Image (spheres, coloured by chain):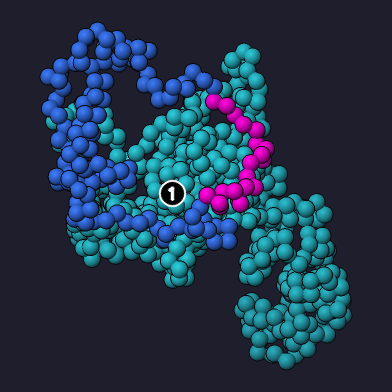
Chain colours: A cyan, B blue
Amino acid sequence: MAASRVTANEIFLNIKEISTRYPKALCLFRQISTSRPHYDKQPEPRTKSASQQLVGVVGLEVHAQINSNTKLFSGSPVRFSAPPNSLVSFFDASLPGTLPMLNRRCVEAAVMTGLALNCTINKKSYFDRKHYFYADLPAGYQITQQRKPIAVDGVLTYSYFGGKKRSQMIRKSVQIKQIQLEQDSGKSLHDDDRSQTLIDLNRAGVGLMELVMEPEMKSGEEAAAAVRELQLILQALGTCQGNMSEGQLRVDANVSVHRPGEPLGIRTEVKNINSIRYLARAIDYEIQRQIDAVQSGRAVQNETRAYDSKSGETVPMREKEGLQDYRFMPEPNLPALIVYEDNASLPTGIDPSQAVVVQKIKDRLPELPGVKRDRLVQTYGILPEHSFTLVNEDGLMEYFETLMKTTQREPRKVIGWVTNELLGHLKQRDMSVSQSPISPAHLAELLKLQETGRISSSAAKQVFQEMWRSGGKTACQIVQEQELGLVHDSAQLHSICQKVVDSHPDEVHAVRNGNKKVLNKLIGLVQKETKGRADPVLVKEILQQMTQ
Amino acid sequence: EFIRKLWEGLLVQSKPPLTSHFPFPAQIPPDLVDKLERLALVDFRTKQGLECLEKAIRFADQLHVVDTTGIEPMDSVLEDRALYLREDTAVDGGCAEELLKLSRKTVEEYFVVPPGNIPLPKKEERSSMLKHSEL
């Protein structure tokens, strides 16, 4: 590894030499670029006394598989599981004589996503070839958009619960450098026993949108929140189904550390992250690992690391052959991709199926998550924190809205039940909203009992638990069976209170002498007697009377 | 437009441009040759190969004689064509058998390949592998 790095440096020096002595020969040496040319690679200055804390710098590269029927450049079907190599055309297998045919749906998806992320859509964008050798890339190059991608300069706003108690909603935004269309590669299955690799090209050629974010994030938490928001947006648009475990949304994190104000440190790329939870963990681990290294005087190496979910650590990945030179060149088989601003700018006589019109796509944009949240706040008067939770959990918003249709209670009183009780129970058991044993209608019934004073708040929580466990029994049934109904009978309460008062003369004395807090103890004792079913208001009244 | 200018530039001179117009022939360092060979998977470090490369560089240098100010670079001869947009309907695939026949080794409908890229032989080994090598 060290040897090849030295070689790479020598080459750089030599190229510099050539370029100064033979400036005209420079045309032959294409800019050696990795896919992230903008990143600063200056080494971290040797450890000084920690006058400032080292902080993490995180930049994400997201590959979103386009939700389309066929692949980006061929008419092969796109499907998650199918017999190996059954979704492969001659072009996907890179047989000689085949040519790429761009899928209009993929262009529309990229434009739609770009618009939803406030990007500028490049009316003219180009395709390039990115060369490297690997068995799952049959052509030896990937068709991508390196020079001029279809969308640039966007913004993704996201929120997360932060602060000391994680109750404060923090809003952040991250700039989207660009969105480009590119091909996916096939899949390799490594058979270490027989020292061979099996290749399935079903995925080769599937359309991807690569979203490059600026390195503005500082932690795993921020990255996870950003990706979650992106996932919600893509799902709302229908341009990507966003399932990370199925590989529809892949995130690579570029992580480095530095002291604020100083140049960026050496970065590592972290791959193999299969869920949003792992994303946060992997990034936090890597930031800490780098901080430890820098503080012990060790240098961080520019390398690719894989996240191991079992150990929670990042480990160096298999060696790539030194620094990659992708030899980007324009894709000679594809002219520029042109999209039109509106119908007015269409050339005369153009076949509508051959024109992608940005305005038309803009008009068709569905309601984005951010708008949804605002609408919930407006319609129901709930807090932004609540609407954030509703939209963030799959199906929770629908549950809440259904519930609101059947209940008469105020949304602010209902929301707690949904975001705390219901969601809490679901999370504890790692269940989704669709799996909830309590339907909105049943919950509405429970709320009605509480509202009409039939049961106390604490009893309501008990009933909820029982409803969950029994999976089907209604609130009324449970209240009846367990005799949880509030006792309003003043005669009955009177006698119980009298009993408590008689058996606790010290406490009564204390209350008479002015210690009001002891009254609560008496109330508690009464509730204990009645198993929490006494009407608390009445009990307090009666006891106050008795202790005067 | 650009090509026309290039041809004009070349035709105006009845002989090839004087080499005195260019910097000295490029001396390609061995490490660069190494790298190029690795990237292209083409062995060319024979005397002939290197001469060929140097000539190619010098030939390409002629482009700098042409004044291209204000002209957009051409990246495809198809630049005047419209990029055809295809409908998103499945019409391909389903030919696994045919494709697998092309591979020397397959296992249960998978193509079989070595585990990872085969590393290129080390520099020392490579020079001994090639005859007429002068590096």
Residue A147 sits above or below residue A412 on the image: above
Q: Secondary structure at mark 1?
A: strand
Location of mark 1 (residue): A60
Q: Nearer the viewer, residue B64 or A293?
A: B64
Left or right position of A270 against A156 = left
Left or right position of A269 against A279 = left
Secondary structure predominantly adopted by residues drawn in magenta: loop
Q: Position of residue A432 (x, y in %)?
A: 67, 62
Residue A25 sits above or below residue A326 on the image: above
Q: Position of residue A220 (x, y in %)?
A: 44, 57
Does the segment drawn in magenta span residue B117? no
| Point 42% across, 37% down: residue | A129
Residue B57 sits above or below residue A449 on the image: above
The boundaries of the magenta stretch are B83-102
| Point 62% across, 47% down: residue | B95
| Point 37% across, 37% down: residue | A328
Left or right position of B28 against B8 = left
Does the segment drawn in magenta span residue B101? yes
Q: Can you say which quadrant of the picture contains the N terminus of chain A?
A: bottom left
